[in-house]
Amino acid sequence: MKNRIIILFLSLFLNAAGFCTESYRISGKVLDSITKEPLEGAAVYVKEDKRYVQTDGTGGFSFETQRRKVTISARLPGYKEAGDSFGVPYENIVLELELSSSFTMGEVHVKEKRRVEGTKQKIQIEQVNKATTHLFSDSIKIIQTLPGVITGNDFSSLMYVRGGEFYETACFLDNIYILQPYMWGGNQSIFNPAFVDRIDFYSGGFPAKYPQALSGVLDVKNIEGDYEKKKGYVDLNVTTLELFAQGPMQKDKSSFVYGFRRTYYDLLMNLAYGDKYKGIEFPYFYDSQAKFTWKLNGEDKISLNLIGSYEGMNFNSAATRDPDIDEKTFKFSYKNSRILPALNYDKVFNDELSMNSTLSLRYEDGTYEFSNEDANSTSRTREYDSYIKNRFTYIKGRHTIEQGVYLFRTTIDADVIHKYRVLMPDNTYFNNEKTYDYDLLSVTAGGTYVQDDIELAKEKLFFNIGGVYEYLDTTHDNTFCPRSGVKYMLSEKIALKFNTGLYTQFPANAANGPPPIFQNRSIKSEKAIHYVLGYEHELPADFFLRLETYIKDYYDRVVNDPDPGLDFTNNGKRKAQGIDLFFQKKTGERWDGWFAYSYLYARDFIEERSDPALFAGKSTLDYLSPVGQWFPFEKERTHNISVVFNYDFNKKYKLAATYRFSTGTPYTDILGVIAGVDPATGITTYVPVHGKYLDDRIPDYNRLDIKLTMPYRNWFGFGREVKNVEFYVQIINVFNTVNVNNYYYSADYKKRYTGQMLPFLPIVGFKYNF
């Protein structure tokens, strides 16, 4: 009896102290208030615990609490937030969301399970906010951790998706087609994480509503701004200053969002090392965005986006030259500014029909200069773009039909002079010059598409079929691309998918130099056929598994040709195949994140190329890629692993970690050198002897980043917490791994140097929320 009394008192004490508090499981569903269909991806929030989870494919949610009464709310883009208070027992809770007046009907009314959209990954604002940042905030960085995505290096925001080039991924921002979404030569994107509401990323098999993309689609939706109250933040760290604000212009009827970013590490470098780097202007950028939204009534909404940026640098390698390193000096400078206004209009006619219209403009002005011992290039370029698109979405019974039409026009006014000397096989140099003079040269492209998502068997079999027709006036090129997909539900939470289609892209993009269509008006669109087979499984406890295998057949790829009458041809082919694995713990509770693995095998083939020896100033030494045989894709990383982990100790202390591993990219080794004297000048020249083309690999890549966010404490006030101020510490490359970007050589090719990526780098910052 005495022992029982002791146990009883001990139990009462532990319960009173909070050590044995009873746990309750909350579970329920989130439904569309009109169709009563489950809504996937809705964020369900428990106010008292300050936790949230995302609904699964059945609209279900589940988590534990120790409270007997809680307030639960749910939110999803396009719907009004809904919630209520609940008490024990927590059984069969149903939250019904009503469509808001700001929705795009075709994106909301259709149950996600019905869509057959290829390989699609949704990134929510919570995931963007939690992720480790980088040197500079950029939404692309989280996309680069998804399966199927390869990056160039630590600095680059470019994405090479499933064996494709970076320009093969089409980018959209609030329905606006962004032709060039990058700054700093691809090292920074215009997608400011502060603005992002969600990101839909497609790495293959995407439907007809996305034209002009060979490999991937990045579809970013920005927030509309708070209609109730004003709020924002100031973020200051060792590299950048960020300002962000949002709020109502007229309560419940209109809102604004504004953001500004500016690097200032460059100012600190010049201040701290003025003598060492005298005359050097380090890379910098200004970036500003704004969005204004008006709810005209229950059926109409207008939003205005404004984007502006200014960037530049002025670098002379001689100013930082190490006297012990015998390397070529170079000068590089550029300035570039961009303005992009855009207008969106959404119209809801009834429960079955909706419309979206988009109009955008772009003006870009840039100067560029580069010089070294072998080349001198200068350019001044102005570009003017206009883009208009109209889309209707019609929902009837088991059909969701979407039809759209677009028109894109770009005009280029440019003067380019490129002087260079070519090393010939006889050890002599040939001085050459190319001049490009584009006087308001215009290119117009247009297209129309239609697609139908069909529920063939209720809750079991879903089918998508569609096609897109496009025309380019410059080359009189027209294409029709059929696309289709099927999804079969093995059970309520297990799906098999297959997508295929023809994908094309006009030859208006170029990694370097003028677009191919300006040099050769007879080349055709590049093309690729996708075959994607996938398995998806909604696992218990908010886990998700996706396993996919794919094959991509490229043809009519644009490749360089030494014949100055051609410059480019469609004589290239590529085959890419691989496996992608994605295992995710969805946002919610205390932790979330994902594990991603990708295997890629990609090979290129050039069917035919003119003989360089037949043309003055053309050397076989400049065309190392073989003809008539397969060789590796230059950006291929055979194995890629990404791990993203976020953990909330509580609402104030948060940890984020990102780990990446990938095998090295191919490169062509230099086996030796042949020295000779130029008879014209008496100068000794050096001809490298190359090994087999792209037959070697740079070392594997390893990098771990961690970030800890916590309240800021004023230690002069005895550690007192400063209200509304966060302090964060991020460490890039925790283990200081030497990751190789490339190799470069001394002028006589006797010494090889390693171009390295980011070392161990701590970043400290403050964020003031208001």
Image (cartoon, rainbow, N blue to C red):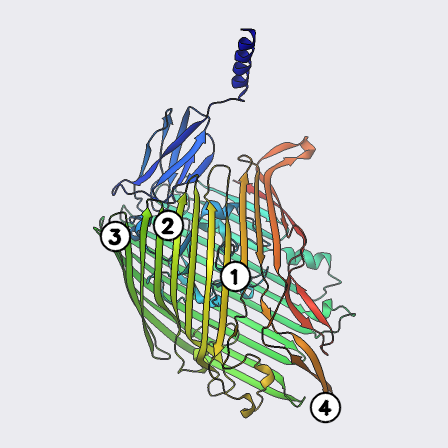
Camera sees residue 295: no
The residue drawn where x is 35% and y is 59% is 498
Camera-near label (3 vs 2) is 3
Q: Which residue position is annotated with label 2?
A: 293
Residue 37 image position (x, y, % from top left): 28, 43
Q: Is residue 746 left or right of residue 391?
A: right
Mark closer to the chain start, 4 or 1 = 1
- Residue 281 at what x, y percent from top left? 65, 64
Under circle 1, the secondary element is strand
Q: Earlier in the sequence, mark 3 or mark 2?
A: 2
Closest to the observer: 598 or 172?
A: 598
As drawn, which residue projects farthest toward the right? 324
- Foreground residue among 522 and 237: 522
Q: Is residue 764 above or below residue 486?
A: above
For residue 360, which quarter of the picture?
A: bottom left
How far across and down, in percent of the image, does residue 165 sit? 48, 68
Mark 4, residues whose alpha carbon is within 10 Å: few (<14), some, or many (≥20)?
few
At label 1, the amino acid type is Ile
The residue mark sitting in front, 3 or 4, is 3
Residue 150 badge: 1
Specify the label residue 455 is tagged with: 3
Gap in Å between the C-alphas at discs 1 and 3?
35 Å
Which mark is nearer the camera, 2 or 1? Answer: 1
Type of amino acid at the residue the image marks with label 2: Thr
Figure check: 471 above or below 94: below
Distance from disc 3 to disc 2, alpha carbons, whole Å, reads: 34 Å
User: Please, what is the three-letter code of the amino acid marked with disc 4?
Assistant: Thr
Spatial CA distance of label 3 from label 4 is 76 Å
Looking at the image, which residue is at 59% across and 78% down? 377
Residue indicated by mark 4: 681
Amino acid of disc 3: Glu
Q: For marks 2 and 1, give the CA distance.
A: 36 Å
